[in-house]
Image (cartoon, grey):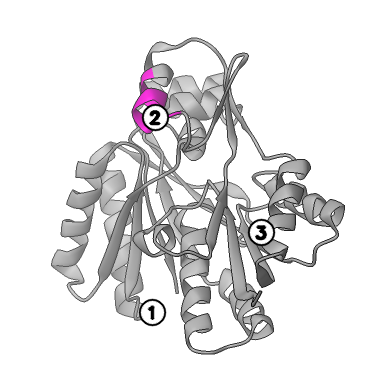
Amino acid sequence: MTLKKIAWLVDSSAYMSNTLKGHPDVYVIPLNIHFGLEQFVDGVDLTSDQLYNRIRNGTESIKTSQPSAGEFAVLYEKLSQEYESIIAIHVSNSLSGTLSSSISGAQIAQIQVEFIDSFSLSAGITGLVEKGLQLQDEGQSYQEITVALREMVSKFRNYILIGNLTQLYKGGRLSSAQFYLGSLLKIKPIIQINHHGELKELDKVRSHKKAIQYLINKAVEAATKDDLQHVYIMHANAEQQANDLKEAILQQAPQLQFTIGEISTSLAVHAGEDTIALLWYS
């Protein structure tokens, strides 16, 4: 049997664009979501509507967990029988243990895999895979592609407007005092995944309107100074806001192209409903 060239593996924190969803060589391994003692598989047996409903109305603790090393091992054994090479691109290792679990799985299966820490999540992973597929179509080798993608990682830019402080508080990323004051003063935190793949607070903005203007300004500035061409707008059950944001940016930067998508349920657990983010590669 002739082996196919490259298998691409991402975890379910990645945004599955039309390019990724329709590609036969792109595989997804799901994260897990826990409501108290109940466990669900991200994107399989829990819809985003069900998640947001439980967040709004439930009182149980919510958390996520990475796939086990054994799950990765089984998948890597299967892929190694069909492909010459495997490239795995995962959510930032500073935010999740998924990459470590993936590496352990390959070691158990004794399969050679090229691992790329995206130092990002969601559409950050998407952009890397889409670029990798493009380079593959252009005839670049497995080694050339991995080198190019690792260089691309440092060019990731993102601005994330948290829509609901409750989930950050429940997840331990906000203290009781920060949660109380933020809610009382209607403070909208802008957070960012830095070059180390860590989630850090970038700014605080009073009022949702000013926070949206902050995002608009960042995109327009990048389009003007850095010749930005394409922007991902990701949202948590806020499609209308995402479309409105796109239109507002286009008024000042009509050359930009956009992809609008919803974040995965595993990310929504932490970010909360109405979160909206701008992500791109410079």
Relative to 115, residue 132 above or below: below
Q: Secondary structure at mark 2?
A: loop
Judge whether residue 166 is colored magenta: no
Q: Is residue 50 above or below residue 99?
A: above
For the residues labelled 3 and 2, say whether their Cβ atoms are less than 8 Å apart. Answer: no
- Determine which quarter of the picture holds residue 4: bottom right
Which percent across, then down, holds residue 137?
48, 83
Instruction: Name the outermost residue toward the front.
Output: 1
Residue 164 numbered tag? 2
To which residue does mark 3 refer? 196
Residue 227 falls in image quadrant: bottom left
Write the start and end of the magenta stretch as one range.
46-53
On the question of residue 158 being in view, the answer is yes
Is any part of residue 154 visible from this angle? no
Of labels 3 and 1, earlier in sequence is: 3
Q: Residues within 10 Å of mark 2 (few under 14, many from 20)?
A: some
Q: Which quadrant does the N terminus fall into?
A: bottom right
Tag 1 secondary structure: loop
Q: Amino acid at mark 2?
A: Asn
Q: Is residue 209 left or right of residue 154?
A: left
Q: Is residue 50 magenta?
A: yes
Q: Which residue is mark 1?
A: 226
